[in-house]
Amino acid sequence: MAEQTHTVIIFDLHTPPSFEQESYNNRAPEGIERKGRHKTRDRISAIDGAHADTAPYAHHLRIVLAVQDDLLEFEKICHIVGCEPRPVRVSRVDAHAKRFFSSRDLFHVQRWIKTMDWKNAFQIEAYLRCGLLNTHDLLVTLQKPIEEAIRYYGTESNEFLRLFNVALKMRTTKTDEDPKVCLERVREAHAKIKPLRLAPGHISCHHVIITPSRILLEGPYTTQSNRVIRHYQGHDSALAERFIRVEFRDEDRLAYRWDGDVDGTWFLQQRVGGILRHGFELGGRAFEFLAYSTSALREHSVWFVSPFRDPIEGYVTAEHIRSSLGDFSKLLRMPSKYAARIAQAFTATDQSVKIRRDQWEEQPDLGPHTDGVGTISLELAEMIWEERCKGSRNLREHRIKPSAYQFRFRGYKGVVVVDHRLEGVKMRLRESQCKFPVDNDDEAPFEIARSFDYPNPVHLNRFVIMYRLGEHQFYRDSLDLQ
């Protein structure tokens, strides 16, 4: 029997392509009234259900042409648009269906990694999701060597697996090194692995990048901690790994973008909104959306958490954490402000001294247009500086002692400065610096978002600028009327 041949176009891609489909709906462009249905282009994550199962792991495409003359048309289009590199004709390409990412093989990988420590499972799943290995490599070639390495390195096995991840990425510069040989090379180069020493106030955090078609895994990276993580880390140091950073990016890891005639609403609701609403599973753990910090949101980065059992508080979920931060009942009808207030607890901060209820008080605001500045006594400032310098000799030697701090404290946020008239350990905060009430807290940590220990540029508050410009315009309008 003669072997059947097809004319195909193979796309060997560095990053997955963007998929769009034309559809009919009742949405009209903003500012235009349009009755009935009209055609739009929507961004989608996959071509169909079968492609959606494979797209997270393999993004190269092979398109079978029904008419051979279509190849000439394709080459003509590439010439017109100046495609680089130009297509190269190959007389024969052998294509065999290996089914590396079939549901059956992926199930066996998941069943295997669920038996091990989650930090190790994270690294192994990263090999698949980042396109470094396939299921055959893991289940047939590397399963036993990886298990031996985990037993050998013990508590530092996740760091060894991370180093193997790096070696696999660097393998592209070598001559098709076998994965098993690569693993043995990494073991020889790192016979012993020392525990990672973290700077004070930092944690080792795993990162997840969610693109339209994939979920990429990176890290763990050293990340500055926050109030919530420190709270549970104080109960059990292992609970810090339950919190992960999730970023939403396009396939090339840049911010989402598409042409003006593409409607991204459906895509954002389904892909981004679906992850935020329903969460995802990773290495045998289910993760759900927790919150974000204001600065991280600019980079489309948020916090997710895997529910856990705390030795003091019992079973902890994302909703339990949010409700424990303070009283947000007055903000439930203002979603943006509600989320911004919760974000206060997730600002990257350094923990400092704890202040008792009898050591601080509120004072009236200076005016209606600013939160004002709180004050702290010299003695309290000395205590904060000493706590800041612990474990950091360089900080004491090369920075001056700050007289102002940007802080987070209970439901308060803002800036405090040293007031030499205050005696003892004393802090006074403005009423407007309280963004939400926190009850049943006799002692709370003074958290430092930023210490002003070197000269900084000064900027006017945006609201003050707009207010003054408005006053000036009102004065000019009055002269015109006269």
Image: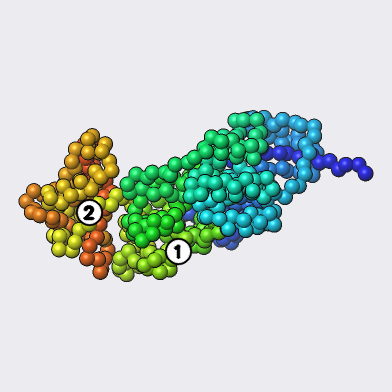
Q: Residue at x 18, y 63 (%)?
A: 357
Q: What is the three-letter code of the residue carrying label 2?
A: Val
Element type where label 1 sits in the image: strand
Q: Position of residue 301 (x, y in %)?
A: 43, 50
Q: Is residue 259 visible?
A: no
Q: Quadrant of residue 102?
A: bottom right
Label 1 crowd bin: few (<14), some (14–19), many (20+), radius 10 Å: few
Q: Which residue has dot 2 on it?
A: 353
The image quadrant where one finds the N terminus is top right
Q: Which mark is first along the chain, 1 or 2?
A: 1
Q: Residue at x 55, y 42 (%)?
A: 165
Q: Position of residue 140 (x, y in %)?
A: 69, 48
Q: Residue at x 18, y 41 (%)?
A: 401
Quick one: which residue is furthest to the left in this view? 421
Which residue is at the front of the view, 220 or 35?
A: 220
Q: Quadrant of residue 398?
A: top left
Q: CA distance from mark 2 to mark 1?
A: 28 Å
Which residue is at the front of the view, 53 or 440?
A: 440
Q: Quadrant of residue 177?
A: top right
Q: Is residue 287 visible?
A: yes
Q: Position of residue 447 (x, y in %)?
A: 26, 53
Which residue is at the front of the view, 4 or 357?
A: 357
Element type where label 2 sits in the image: strand
Question: Is residue 108 rendered to the left or right of residue 161?
Answer: right
Question: Is residue 112 rendered to the left or right of residue 291?
Answer: right
Q: What is the three-letter code of the residue carrying label 1?
A: Phe
**Is 400 above or below relative to 325?**
above
Q: Position of residue 42 (x, y in %)?
A: 58, 52
Q: Which residue has dot 1 on it?
A: 308
Question: Is residue 222 rendered to the left or right of residue 26?
Answer: left
Question: Is residue 220 rendered to the left or right of residue 225?
Answer: right
